[in-house]
Image (cartoon, rainbow, N blue to C red):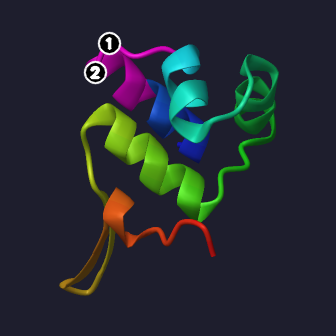
Amino acid sequence: MSVGNKIKSAMVAKNKNRQDLANALNITDKAITAKFYRDSFSAEDLIKIADCLGYSLNFSSNDNNIIFRLEDIKTGE
């Protein structure tokens, strides 16, 4: 399953739409549509989307977990 499709499934579960994500990423409707079309989300996008949907972003491998939250993004630098 593509990243975009996973995001779409999470959006349905949380009753959110593309405009909600566009607002969370501070981008236009057209820009969020392009991200879904190209399936191109940066790590920062994914953290913001997870926060918008009420999730944390987790990377797991061999019993090791790394969790990213919105506070992990440095702003203004």
Query: Would you say 70 lies left or right of 13 here?
Result: right
The answer to which quarter of the image holds residue 76 is bottom right
Stretch of the chain drawn in magenta:
9-17
| Residue 14 marker | 2
Residue 33 percent coordinates (x, y): 75, 24
- Give SS at disc 1: loop
- Residue 69 is at least partly visible in this image: no
Quadrant where the C terminus is found in the figure? bottom right
The answer to which quarter of the image holds residue 35 is top right
Residue at screen point 46% across, 68% down: 73
| Residue 62 marker | none
Residue 42 percent coordinates (x, y): 65, 59
Q: Which residue is mark 1?
A: 15
The answer to which quarter of the image holds residue 10 is top left
Residue at screen point 28% across, 21% down: 14
The stretch drawn in magenta includes residue 11:
yes
Do tag 1 and tag 2 residues touch (Cβ < 8 Å)?
A: yes
Task: Specify the amino acid type for callout 2.
Answer: Lys
| Cα gap from disc 1 to disc 2, whole angstroms | 4 Å
- Residue 72 is at least partly visible in this image: yes
Residue 4 percent coordinates (x, y): 59, 37
Query: Would you say 59 lies left or right of 31 here?
Result: left
Residue at screen point 73% across, 49% down: 40
